Amino acid sequence: MNKLGNELADAWLKKKTIDLNKFNRSEIPKTREEAYNVLDTFYEKLNKKTLGWKIGAVSKEVQLDESFDGPVPGKIFEETILESNCAIKFTDIPASNLECEYAFKFKKNLKIDNSLNTKLKHLSLYIAIDITSSRYKKTSKEKFDKLTQMYLGIADHGNGGKIIIGEEIKNWENVNINDIKISLNVNGNLSEPSYIGQKRVDPRESLRVFIDEFKSKKINFNKGDYLLCGSLTQPYTLKENDKIKINYENIGFIKIKIL
């Protein structure tokens, strides 16, 4: 698995994609454990400063729809966190999607174990955007079944790209956060792409799923770290020259320009 991890790290640094047709089937992860082994190689080679984690495909309904066997996590690199009114070069995010999310921010160092569920007073909540990306040539990844594509996504930094942190949701524990409407204004066209029902997961559930996934790995959240909690909306495929304004009803806006 080291070959894939090393090439993914090189692809991240050079902003390029890799062709999976050049890999033997034995070099492609077939289990979550193998995917994490590739991811470990990826992180060891890059040695980037991290500020927490992201987790996607949290909902059991989404996992069932996508034929996944669990969530899709990855670290958050400090250098990829952007302010809420930002401009991004399209060449930095080719073949990327925008997803509206919530993000926990940790007010103190905390261990990732079951007791973390009872320490919500030490977490604040923000509106956020996850710009997902990929280091694979699309056609070479699509030849695999969805489960293998998920393992490839974990190996690829959890499909990580850019993270945008917006405004804090004050007194969030007393807000019906899953009822908040989210609208996207893309180049003047307005839509409300919010997930509803079981596909829209409460961030507290995302935290629980993250704990279940990582409590045996002896890692911690540090003060100031984030946990990006999974998509609240249908992904939007970003295009060059897009001008986007995201409105979280009665909470705040995030503005993005794609150059």
Image: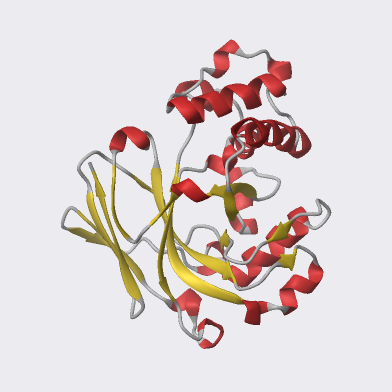
From this view, report whether residue 80 is shown above or below residue 229: above
Question: Horizontal and vertical percent for residue 34?
Answer: 75, 32
Residue at image position (58%, 46%) is 49
Question: Horizontal and vertical percent for residue 143?
Answer: 55, 23
Residue nearest the observer in this picture, 59 or 117: 117
Q: Does residue 214 appear to the left or right of 160 in the view shown?
A: right
From this view, report whether residue 34 is shown above or below residue 137: below
Quarter of the figure with residue 164: bottom left
Question: Horizontal and vertical percent for residue 138?
Answer: 46, 26
Quadrant housing the N terminus: top right
Residue nearest the observer in this picture, 205 or 61: 205
Q: Does residue 137 appear to the left or right of 193 in the view shown?
A: right
Seen as rendered, the residue at the extreme right is 216
Quarter of the figure with residue 169: bottom left
Residue nearest the observer in this picture, 140 or 167: 167
Query: From this viewpoint, is residue 54 visible?
Result: no
From this view, report whether residue 244 is shown above or below residue 251: above
Residue at image position (40%, 45%) is 97
Seen as rendered, the residue at the extreme left is 188
Give the number of marks: 0
Quadrant housing the C terminus: top left
